[in-house]
Amino acid sequence: MSTATRSTATKRPTGKHTSSVVTTAHSATVDTPIGPFTAITAEDGVVLASGWTGAVDDLLVVISPSLRPAEVRPRTELGAVTKAIRSYHAGELDAAAEVPVRQRGGEFMEHAWTTLRTVPAGKPVTYADYATLAGRPQAVRAAASACARNAAALFVPCHRVLRTGGGIGGFRWGVEAKRWLLDHEDLG
């Protein structure tokens, strides 16, 4: 069952904006087996941020300032984005793979996020493997940083990256959530 954020539209202070700033975005929250999952989308339906939280403010802070919306309006759902969230949690593990995402970072970081979307469910990689997949085998810390700065959890599946040696590593939404996601994908 889907629930929308019940508060009024969230606004951020206005000021000097570049042309890439999203002025209005939309959010919706979906109940999942591991808690509420909220997504923020630009007006064109592209995911700007998402994660296992019921609070839009938790997501606004991880959106690049060049993309951060001036206002977020709650909705009951976000079309294909909400469908993908529900389908993924119901067992369709590739449901989020084709949903468009918009993030900003340096050249390597943006490439690393795109690369991460190619890591299949049920086949997690280590940070060293991830750095190699992204074309910079020596950039293990940069690959880890790309995971840590990923604003679009699930759609850019940073939960599929583990520590070298198999340790689960950290996750913005909690180690328990990461473990659930990995188990969910392993069983799928």
Image: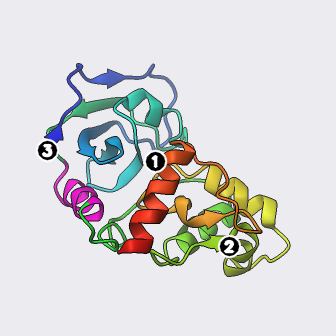
Give the residue pinned by disc 3: 1
Residue 156 visible? The answer is no
The residue beneath circle 2 is: 130
Give the residue number, with chain letter if any, for mark 1. Answer: 20
Please give the name of the residue rendered at 54% of the width and 59% of the height, measured from the top-left corner: 159
Q: Determine whether label 2 and label 1 are within 8 Å by CB.
A: no
Q: Tell whether position 111 is magenta.
A: no
Amino acid on which disc 1 is placed: Ser
Task: Tell me which label, 2 or 3, sits earlier in the chain.
Answer: 3
Q: How would you rate the neighbour count of disc 1 (Cα within 10 Å): few for under 14, some for 14-19, many for 20 or more? A: few
Secondary structure mainly formed by the magenta segment: helix
Quote the CA–CA distance across marks 2 and 1. 29 Å
Dot placed on the residue nearer the N-terminal end, 1 or 3: 3
Residue 54 drawn at (x, y percent): 34, 32
Residue 70 is situated, as x and y percent measured from the top left of the image, at 38, 30
Q: Position of residue 183 (x, y in %)?
A: 45, 64
Label 3 crowd (10 A; few <14 / some 14-19 / many >=20): few
- As helix, strand or loop, the secondary structure at mark 3 comes to loop
- Which picture quadrant has residue 115? bottom right
Label 2 CA crowd tier, 10 Å (few <14, some 14–19, many 20+): many
Q: Nearer the viewer, mark 2 or mark 1?
A: 2
Mark 2 or mark 3, whichever is nearer to me: 3
Relative placement, left or right, of 59 versus 66 is: left
Q: Which residues are magenta?
A: 78-89
Q: Which is nearer the N-term, disc 2 or disc 1?
A: 1
Question: What amino acid type is highlighted by mark number 3?
Answer: Met
